[in-house]
Amino acid sequence: MTPMRWVYLALAVWGAIHPMYYFVSWFQANGWNLGEMIDAWYVSDATTGLTWDLTIAAVSLTIWIIAEVVVRRNWSALIAIPATYCIGVSCGLPLYLFLRSRPIV
């Protein structure tokens, strides 16, 4: 495996673990209610802007993944889409780059 693939994999793991720490901490402090967390994303203009920024990035990444999977036939790379929406762009993008950089045989 190339050094760059290791970097992508490390970033995907970090992008899964680090944000999840804050999500779990928030849920433990405020209850396990997803609706309340979504409401918290829109509590100020700053968080609303960040929410929209990440939403647009996630949609863009999804379109890119689908377009490339159709051309490259790298179907396993589709796993990056649920990772993006269930964990975040911080996990989905480096995971996709890791899967995309795999040698094609």
Image (cartoon, grey):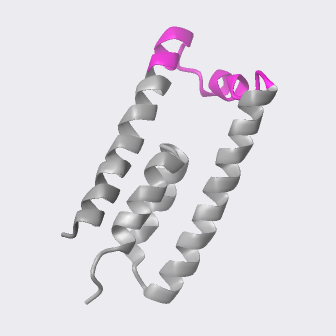
Q: Where residue 65 appears, x then y in whole percent?
A: 53, 71
In the rendered image, residue 26 lying in the magenta stretch gets the answer yes
Does 69 sit left or right of 17 as displayed?
right
Does 21 sit left or right of 35 as displayed?
left
Segment tinted magenta in the rendering = 25-44
In the rendered view, would you say 84 is above or below 96? above
Q: Where residue 27 appears, x then y in whole percent?
A: 51, 18
Classify residue 50 by image quadrant: top right
Q: Where residue 19 appears, x then y in whole percent?
A: 46, 33
Q: Outermost residue toward the top?
A: 29
Closer to us: 42 or 9: 9
Residue at (69% x, 38% y) in the render: 51
**Which secondary structure class fits the magenta region best?**
helix
Does 75 sit left or right of 85 as displayed?
left
Residue at (36% x, 36% y) in the render: 17
In the rendered view, would you say 76 is above or below 17? below
* Figure quadrant of the N terminus: bottom left
Classify residue 61 by image quadrant: bottom right
Residue at (78% x, 23% y) in the render: 44
In the rendered view, would you say 104 is above or below 40? below
